[in-house]
Amino acid sequence: MPQEKHHWRASRKMQLRARELRRAMTPAEKKLWTHLRFEQLDGAHFRRQHAVGPYIVDFFCAKAKLVVEVDGDIHAEPEQAKYDAERTQWLNEQKEYRVIRFWNNEVLNSIEGVLDAIHQALMREQ
């Protein structure tokens, strides 16, 4: 029997937190956002710091069901890595979203490679 999917709506609290995070983006997030905003990448519309159920994702393309995460050093810590894995599993199972991750240094030093990987992920959906 297939697992029942819930259509979680982010709480008002999560929506307000997402707004705060949009105002306090990291340098890597800002750099990637300059390339994703205004549908610059394959005409895909991305949202930044988007609340999804109990989580906030860095970048989200609804049409492709694609989540793009930009991770700093804290994400290498075992507890954070476990949390990230649980979060990714929830996004996959409950929302059928695909999650791709990049390290801050990849975005800051190899933006073309990051954009190419996002482009490839977008193309898989078509």
Image (cartoon, rainbow, N blue to C red):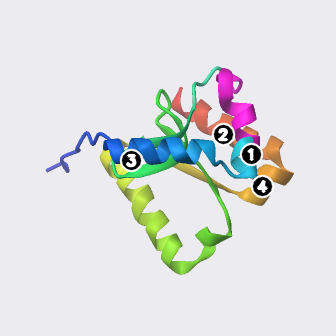
Three-letter residue code for mark 2: Ile
Q: Residue furthest bottom?
A: 78
Q: Tell me which numbered mark, 3 or 1, is placed earlier along the sequence.
A: 3
Residue behind mark 3: 14
Determine the residue positioned at 60% across, 25% down. Answer: 44
Are circles 1 and 2 on residues that touch, CB within 8 Å? yes
> For the residue carrying disc 2, how many other residues have a C-alpha within 10 Å: few (<14), some (14-19), or many (20+)?
many
In the depicted view, which residue is nearer to us: 114 or 104? 104
The magenta region covers: 31-42
Decide which of tag 4 and tag 2 comes sooner along the chain.
Answer: 4
Horizontal side, residue 1 vs residue 20: left or right? left
Mark 1 packing: few (<14 Cα in 10 Å), some, or many (20+)?
A: some
**Which residue position is annotated with label 2?**
118
Measure how far apart labels 4 and 3 are at the Cα level.
28 Å
- To which quarter of the image does residue 51 belong? top left
The residue positioned 50% from the left and 47% from the top of the image is: 57
Badge 4 or badge 3: first in the primary sequence: 3
Left or right: residue 88 compared with residue 28:
left
Q: Which residue is mark 1?
A: 114
Residue 33 shown in magenta:
yes
